[in-house]
Image: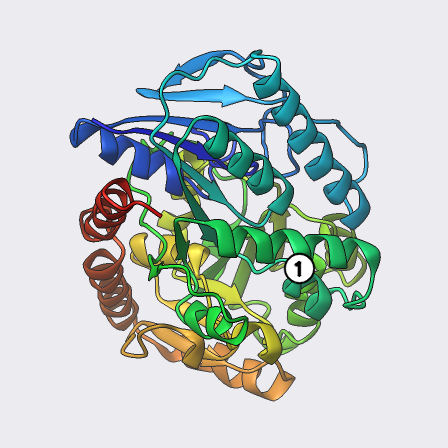
Amino acid sequence: MKNILFINHFAGVPGINERSLRHFILSKNSISNGDKSTIITSQNHYQSLKKDYYSHNNTIDIDGINFIFIKERSYKNVNLLTKFLKMISFSKNLFFAFLFRKIKLDRVDIVYASSPDLFSSFVAYYIAKRKKAKFILEIRDIWPLSQIVIHKFSPKHPVILLMRSIELFLLKKSDHIISTLNNYKLYLDENNIKTEYTFVPQVVNNTFIKEKISINIPYTNFEKVGIYAGSVGSLYRIENFINSFPVHLKDKICIIIIGDGDRWKEIKRLIDKKNLPNFFITNSQPRSILQNYYEIADFAISIHPVEAELHKYGFSPLKIIDYMNAKLPILFVGDSSLFDDNSLKGLIESEFDEKALLESFISILELSKEEMIDMGNDNYNFVNDNNSIYVIKYNIEAIFESISNHEK
């Protein structure tokens, strides 16, 4: 039996933050193998739907998995500065909670840390050394490169230089590297990293139980219903999507936006200012409630602005996997060549320009109900063939066994 400690600042927690339940799902699977898992995370970060719901520093059983919640500082505003300060706060509190034994950790065989928070991953490495455990680093978002590319930070900015030094240290010192990015090996090669590496894609979330609700949106007034469920942040340029929506289709297609982010208020004001009767926006919902929206939707929307310098290393389509598992065809705004497998049949593809979006919406309007159901079923079959826990677990189990038997 192996004792596995997951450390992820943003780990998904049922009912608290369900955007990515990857480590919870892996932990549930490890129980069936006779292993024991504990997840250290925060319940106060910007993705959490409930703050301070559980006590801190104590081991709490949630759906059969042990969680330990570490306190982090709260800020009224959500922006790059406060996100950075919250990372520092969480990592500092985790370090001192471990150092002064405020959290109870018995035998640990494997410490599994996850990006993008490199500071907490650095603390996780320290914990692994103190516990004489193997250390796995998982990369889901390449920091600090994503900050340089997306937010235009200078590579010579002191904070970027600090994160870059931590990143390279962890990549070199890890016993194994995992990434959800399908071409991350290229990044490792370019940086002359020789650590053992495995691509392990995102996993389907089938752990939720639907909570029935009434949806107070007049969606039945439209021929087709589209849903966007994800970040309403500056990266995704939701305002461009709204401004490019063909006016003559506003009585035929409605769009429901569900999410949170630094552009939420601006998007709400834009919808109100333009008096768009076919656009509706609400805050993030747990997966159990989100299922209600999926069931009334005819298609889902995935928006992925392409940053070539970053995306050449891969693409981690977590929300797309959720859409596919809900049996929805997808309007994909971006470059579908980023996918690990280009054999997808359930996509309606579009670029970011107004003409391409118009053509895509017309295509959606012309699709019959039966055609859309077939596309949704194709997506469902594809994602469960490639991203179910029964597929992913073999890679994870092989990595655990390999590093447990390997002396570095």
The picture quadrant where one finds residue 30 is top left
Neighbour tally class for label 1: few under 14, some 14-19, many 20 plus, Cα within 10 Å = many
Does residue 212 appear anywhere in the picture?
Answer: no
Q: Residue furthest bottom?
A: 355
Q: Is residue 344 above or below residue 124?
A: below
Q: Is residue 204 above or below residue 125?
A: below
Task: Find residue 311 and report its horizontal and vertical position in percent.
Answer: 54, 73
Q: On the image, numbered disc 1 is attached to which residue?
A: 144
Question: Residue 91 versus residue 28: which sits nearer the camera?
Answer: 91
Q: Is residue 348 above or below residue 268?
A: below
Residue at 55% over, 34% down = 126
Task: Find residue 128 and report its horizontal and vertical position in percent.
Answer: 46, 33
Question: Residue 306 versus residue 400: which sits nearer the camera?
Answer: 400
Residue at 58% over, 11% down = 102
Q: On the picture, is 358 further left or further right than 188?
A: right
Q: Give amino acid for label 1.
A: Pro
The picture quadrant where one finds residue 284 is top right
